[in-house]
Amino acid sequence: MIDFHFHAPVKEFLDFLGEFSEPAIKYFNANVEIKELKGTLDHYESLGIRRFVVLPIDSTTFLGRRIPNEIVKADDRIVRFVSVDPLKPNAVEELKKVIKEIEPVGVKFHPELQGFHPLDERAIKLYKVIDDHALTVVFHSGTSGIGAGVRSNIRLDYGRPIYFDEIAVRFKNMKIILAHFGWPWTEEAIAISLHKPNVYLDLSGWAPRFIPDVIYKNAKRLSNKLIFGSDFPLISPERWIKEFGEINLSQDIKDRILKLNAERLISD
């Protein structure tokens, strides 16, 4: 299996959550502990997860904090993704530099927590670099458990799936993964992923028994577009895998979701 949405349970992760930490943990009903990354990966490898997309995030401009890119170099089991703050004046140069130094498979953006509209021209300049390298992008989409119930400047509109349709048209070499399937605009996300060959949906951040039925009802049509991600440590892979095993889908579709679709994205 490949967990395509995994956060390192390190001090930087809790530091990044900051004032949103307690409400987020409550929102997800999670038990978040700081742990050593290698031991964490060892544990989940023993459960059958062989690769992990560990997602850093740079929100220096909007929130004044970041989970550094260097964390993805910690282990060979990590599928390397990096993050650059689109609002930084030198964002394009920084992205080119980090691509050269880290050689990532992809880039992570969280428009809501980075404080930018997905079609902001500053972000568009970064997409051009990503498209030139034919990399994969994980975009947070839909609502945000981070910041839920807390007064903030976080705008949920920045997670609307429809904006990524325009990005998919403009940047056809860029593979786009809409994390969390855009809930509550899930049907919008499904329509885009069915229409655009370079758009996929990850199922992270939701325990499988709570994933909206519309995903499962369209699972056959989406069989090459759905990707397993846990959102660890906010959702445990143990729980995700156990509950997913109880979902009434064919084994072929489950195999694609748990491994084959992600494998194709990583190898392309």
Image: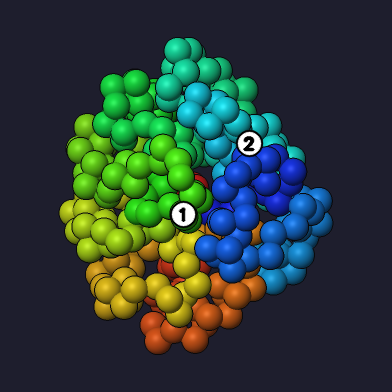
Say which of 264 and 200 sits in front.
200
x then y, percent, for residue 51: 62, 55
Mark 1 — residue? 148
Which quadrant is the N terminus positioned in?
A: bottom right
- Measuring 40% from the left and 87% from the top, which residue is drawn there? 248
x then y, percent, for residue 108: 48, 39
Quarter holding residue 130: top left
Say which of 107 and 60 sits in front.
60
Q: CA distance from mark 2 to mark 1?
A: 20 Å
Give the mark toward the camera: 2 or 1.
Answer: 1
Left or right: where 267 falls relative to 134:
right
Say which of 232 and 38 sits in front.
232
- Measuring 64% from the left and 73% from the top, which residue is drawn there? 238
Which quadrant is the C terminus positioned in?
A: top left
Q: Amino acid at mark 1?
A: Ala
x then y, percent, for residue 29: 59, 68
Left or right: where 213 falls relative to 94:
left
x then y, percent, for residue 36: 81, 51
- Measuring 71% from the left and 51% from the top, which residue is drawn there? 9
Q: Amino acid at mark 2?
A: Ile
Is there any visible trace of residue 10 in the rendered image? Answer: yes
Is there any visible trace of residue 84 in the rendered image? Answer: no
Residue at the extreme front of the image, as rendered: 151
Q: Which mark is residue 175?
A: none
Quarter holding residue 234: bottom right
Q: Is residue 145 above or below residue 17?
A: below
Mark 2 — residue? 67
What is the secondary structure assignment of the residue under circle 1? loop
Q: Residues within 10 Å of mark 1 (few under 14, many from 20)?
A: some
Q: Residues within 10 Å of mark 2 (few under 14, many from 20)?
A: many
Dot 2 and dot 1 residues touching (CB under 8 Å): no
What is the secondary structure assignment of the residue under circle 2? strand
